Every structure is written in structure tokens, then in C-alpha cells.
Image (cartoon, rainbow, N blue to C red):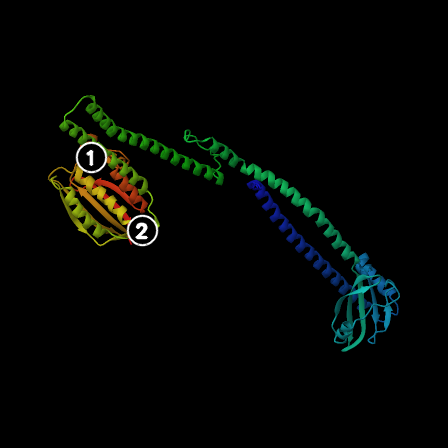
Amino acid sequence: MRRPLSIHTRLTLWYTGVLLATLVVVSVVGYSLLAWNLAQDVDQSLLTVAEVVRDRSAGADTGSPVERTLRELLGPDGLDQFFQIIDPAGTPRVRSPRLPGRAPLPLSPAARANAAHGRATFETLRFERGHDVRVLTLPVIRDGALVEVVQVGMSLAQRERTLRRYFQSLLVLVPLAVALAATGGALMARAALRPVDQMSAAARRITAEALGQRVRVQGTGDELDRLAETLNGMLARLETAFAEIRRFSADAAHELRTPLTALKGGLEVALRAERSPEEYRRVLAGSLEEVERLGRLAEDLLALSRASAVPESRRDRVDLEALALDLLDVGARLSAGTGVAVRLKEATPAAVRGDADALRRAALNLVENAVKYTPPGGTVATSVTRDGEAALFVVEDTGPGVPAADAERIFEPFVRLDDARARDIGGIGLGLAIARSIVAAHGGTLTVERGAGGGARFVIRLPAV
């Protein structure tokens, strides 16, 4: 497979190609303008000479007096032209001594017709050994009648030589300029992209074990600095993510080790000596509790891993009011025998788009968490409201509340503010983390604040539809 071209090579090629195209266009335009200007100069020169010949040729039977006049008025530049004067019938009357060859200047039908109507004619004719000659045919009108015709000619050989030399110069200068520009462009591209190579080398040295390193910022404030800052920001996020993964792995291992240690200890004690059926039954019952705890932990870990992504195919319209009514019944069953009252405080019609099962689990985790941490005689209230373009699902309790310093930490996996009580009521510390992941996957936020009664107030905010 052919190796792709490097960026600085592609930049050099693009720069060279654009420059070559620009120079070609400029050269073509310059050549055309030069040719046009030379043609205008030739025509203007012919017109000047024709007017001089017309004014000085009256009564002259040879071209010598006119030649002298042209030499006096125009200097050496006037000697490049030759002329002849013909009568209306087309017979030459006066000829310039400098007229090459013996043949007179040709009078084309178009020039003859224009002269008859008093119009001058510029034309390019093939004359003498294949050279192009620019000819001006100027009628002389007196008393409304055509009395003679002045023809002035000028060889275009000098113009063609000038254009040819200009073209040859372009053939040398344009490739030379392109070659020099390509060399300079390659050097500039290499120098401009050298910081990118340095960033690439620095990025290759950064591994999962050395995420604290950063790409050096040049301090120029240009695009490369912004790229370096972007890479450093990405590395910072990766470092945070790796730290969270390591902490999560350590916490998960600790949570798994506790029930496994209890399970192993109980079984070892039961096997040290003969036990009665009742004692074996107690050991097995305790082991079953630890197995159930392990099962809940595994399910929560699986739910947490899946909560961060909700497929588009599973997103439907979800009625939060209906969800709140459903959770009211579930909350009543969860609070049975605890002395905690679960009620629906407010229900405003509101709908969101998402996975109904996932959103139900997030809301249920909040209700279950509130019931667990609310003392007997307390209240857990849910409500559904709208706030502009957002739909709010709120769970408020009259429990001990959440300190402001821990308002974000409680959403981290395996975080329990009251660890001993959480273990007594079966808490693992993943419920709030799962709820926030589900809400975030739906483009919403989950926050906690102090409730009106001093307890905790959890607010799910989702885009309404």
C-alpha cells in the first residue's frame, strides 16, 4: 500500500500548484495586454504619420519632401513607416522611397469601400517575404469629394520580436519562480509544522501510566497553541477518567471482597466441626444473604455500565405525570412498615423523549433512596413540573439532608455518607450514580439541594417535548 504524503509535502504541492496557476494566468494576461498595447501604439503611430502625409503631400509628385517632413517632425521613429498616395481610381501617385519592393501597397475591397464613404481602415496584410504589415488607409476628402487616399504601412516584425522575447522570458522566469517558491514553501511548511512534530513526539511518550505529562505550549497564541491546549485539555480529562476508573475498580473490588469474606468465613466456621441442622440452616441463610448482596451489586454494576448510552431506537415519548403516578404506588410498597409516607405533591402534564424503562429506574432510585434515609414519621414527596422548555421530576424528603460539601460527591459510585447505616439498610452506593448516568444520557441534569423542610431535594431536569 502506497504511503500517504506528509502534510508539509501536500502543503508544498498545493502552494506550488496555486502559484503556478497564478503565474500562468498573470503571464497570459500580461502577454495579452502587451500585445494589445503594442497594437494600439502601432495604430496610433500609423494615424500620426498618415495625417502628416495628408497635410504635406499637396502638390508633391514624389515622396522625398514628405519623408523629410516626417524626419523633422517625428524624428527617427517616423522612419519605420512607409506610405503611398493613390488617386480615387487606385493608381499610385506618390510613393515613399522606403516602400519595400516594387509592388504598391495593396488596397483591399473593404478599404476601398470604406474610403469611398470617408472612413479610415486599419488592417493587417501579408506583405513582402511573408511578413505581416499593418496598413492604414486614410481617405482625403475635400469639398465633400474623395480626392486621394493615403496609405501608411508599418512592418509588424519588431512587434513580433518584442512579443517573442517577452514570451521567452516568461518561459524562463515562470519555472524559475515556481522552483524557488516550491523550495521556500517546503522550508516554511517544514518550519511551521515542526511544533506539530514535537507535539506528536510528546503525545507518543504519554501512556496510561504517565498521563500527568502535557504537550508544551509555545505561547504564540496561534492555531498550534490552541491545538496544544486542546490536547492538554483532552489529556486532563483522560487523566481524570483513568483516576475514576482506578478508584471505581478499587471500590468495586472492596465491595465484592466484603460479602465474599463474610461468605467464606461463615462456610469455614460451619465446616470446622459437626453442626446441628439448625446451625447449618443459619449458616446457609447468612450465606444466601451475602449471595443476594453480590447479585444486587452485579446488577447495579451492569446497570451503571449501560446507563451512559441510550440507543436512539429505544427513545420514545415518556409521560412524566404517568411515571410519577406509577412510582407513587411503588413508593407506598417500599415504605410499608417504615412509618414513612410517600405522596404526590404536584403533577403537571409534561413529557420527554427517552427510554421509559431507564427513566423509570432513575426516578425509582431517587424514591427508594429517599425512603431509606427518611426517619419514621417523615414524608417523601414527588412532583412533576415544567420550567420553560424543561420538564422537572422532583423527589423531596424530610430526612437528614445532604451537606453542601457532599452535593456532588454523593453521585460518585460507592459513596455513602453514612456507611454503617447504609450497610444496615442494604445500600451499595450505586443508586445515585446510576440515576445521574441515565439522566445525563438523556441530555438532562440531576442535582441535589436542601429542601424546604431541611431534607434533601433531588431534581431531574430533562428537555421537554
Q: CA distance from mark 1 to mark 2?
A: 32 Å
* Residue 408 figure quarter: top left
Classify mark 2: residues with Cα within 10 Å, few (<14), some (14-19) or many (20+): some
Q: Check residue 426 in the rendering and tell me which mark sits there, or answer none.
A: 1
* Residue 45 figure quarter: bottom right
Judged left or right of residue 25, residue 197 is left
Residue in front for this viewpoint, 374 or 195: 374
Judged left or right of residue 250, residue 374 is left
- The N terminus lies in quadrant: top right
Query: Where does label 2 land, which residue?
Result: 315
Residue in front for this viewpoint, 254 or 91: 254
* Place of residue 236 in the rendered image (x, y in percent of width and height, measured from the top left): 39, 34
| Element marked by disc 1 | loop
Judged left or right of residue 37, residue 330 is left
On the question of residue 226 being in view, the answer is: yes
* Residue 106 figure quarter: bottom right
> Looking at this rendering, what residue extends furthest in the bottom direction?
144
Which amino acid is tagged 1?
Gly
- Label whose residue precedes the other's in the sequence (1 or 2): 2
* Place of residue 83 in the rendered image (x, y in percent of width and height, measured from the top left): 83, 66
Q: Is residue 396 above or below residue 83?
A: above
Which amino acid is tagged 2?
Arg
Classify mark 1: residues with Cα within 10 Å, few (<14), some (14-19) or many (20+): few
Residue in front for this viewpoint, 182 or 261: 261
* Place of residue 301 in the rendered image (x, y in percent of width and height, measured from the top left): 29, 37
| Element marked by disc 2 | loop
Judged left or right of residue 110, residue 365 is left
Q: Who's the residue at 17% across and 28% down the image? A: 280
Q: Check residue 122 in the rendering and tell me which mark sits there, or answer none.
A: none
Q: How many marks?
A: 2
